Amino acid sequence: RTARALEWRRAAPFRVDEELSGFSLGDIGAKAIAVALQSAGNSKLRELRLGDNSIGNAGAEALAQVLRLPECRLRRLSLRNNDIGDVGGRAIALALTSNAVLEEVDLWGNCLSDDCKRAILSVARCTVFVELDLPCRSPSQLAEGHLSNRMHRILFDWISQVHIGVWAPAAFEGTPDPQDMMFRALAHMDAYILCGGVADRSELQLSGVACTLIAAGLCRGDAFDREEVAAWLAFVTDGACTTDQVLDTADRIREVLGFRLHRPTAYTFLRRYLRWTGWSEESFSLANYLIEIAVTTGLACVFSPQAVAAAAAVLSHQYSAQGVVVPHMPRWKNKLLRCARLDVERELAPCTSELAQLHANLYSGATQFVNQKYTWSRFHGVARIVPNLPFNAQFYARYLEAEWMP
């Protein structure tokens, strides 16, 4: 009894840290965190990561009660890889019906039924991620899905051009983050190809614009905006498909992919990581360029989105001599490793090495649109930066682990 009374997880912390993943908090610790979040000292907290903590229904219910409070100002909450079941999931769903401040919630890796996931997604006023993309897929899987590596590059480069469309309708351009929409469209397309949704290469262009329509969030929105965007997307195919075909294909892809539409992308993780590692407008453009070439060339099919984003964050810190200056952030590598929770030797270092090599290969004469796009001044001309980094994975492993403290 004395040991239980003294257990540290029962005491509400004076100050809640953003990163509390992997501390075995359980329901007891989650309840303590919920109490602490209601104190004035934690009112400025905007992000909270509670992944890998064995939090169950009781802990989720306690946190959901806090989310329902009008003074709760959290914008991002991660409850990934816990033991939350439908009881806790329903409590979170109830909180999300009224919470208008939250922007992102991670719920993948829990024990939620499909019905509970649907209930959460149907009422949430924010982005909820209920699944995570599988890492380390073989590039040969693209060919098995009727798409060679070359065709993958051509198709994804074309989709990237569509998202820069000059004459895009207002509903298409009104998205809060066009870059986020583009990466979601590319992720949907990858998932649809890999699950065998494309029966013939002739369907690739139609599927690409349909995924763009889904990423715009208009498949179940206003009917007029949906048809306007679908008509424009049909137009950019030069008559290869009709408006009705775009609409019908989008509905079919939604049905095939289901919860796979609600996965975080490399861009999702990049935004999170750069908050911890520091960034400037130039380094943000460079990191975006790196993850975009990883996605368009198929490298992102081999590594997890977390690894691709973390590798881009690492490489974006290496070009200060060429004008990409990042504000000093003490122990940024340590913070990145804590946030990403990747195996350096097996995941992050190999991915960083591959991305550095891909960057060098594309610089030496590639004609892809993504290279042209990132020479524009709005992206600070980062595609003109001369790659000069090593391709050795062991180099990056030593570099990242030099200051690592778990």
Image (cartoon, rainbow, N blue to C red):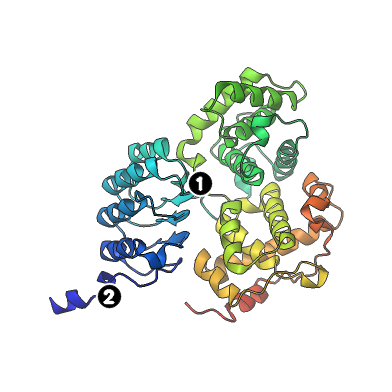
On screen, residue 25 versus residue 193, left or right, reads left
| Type of amino acid under label 2 | Trp
Nearer the camera: disc 2 or disc 1: 2
- Where residue 298 appears, x then y in whole percent? 67, 49
Q: Residue furthest bottom?
A: 402
Residue 190, placed above or below residue 326: above
Q: Which of these two is toward me, 38 or 265?
A: 38
Q: Which of these two is toward me, 394 or 9?
A: 9
Residue 8: mark: 2
Tell me where residue 99 sits by quadrant.
top left
Tell me where residue 324 sits by quadrant.
bottom right
| CA–CA distance in space, label 2 to label 1 | 34 Å
Q: Who's the residue at 32% across and 46% down the image?
A: 89
- Where residue 155 appears, x then y in whole percent? 72, 38
- Where residue 191 appears, x then y in whole percent? 56, 41
Q: Who's the residue at 82% across and 69% down the image?
A: 322
Q: Which of disc 1 and disc 2 is earlier in sequence?
A: 2
User: Is the N terminus in the top left, top right, bottom left or bottom right quadrant?
Assistant: bottom left
- Where residue 391 appears, x then y in whole percent? 72, 69
| Type of amino acid under label 1 | Arg
Secondary structure found at label 2: helix
| Circle 1 residue | 263
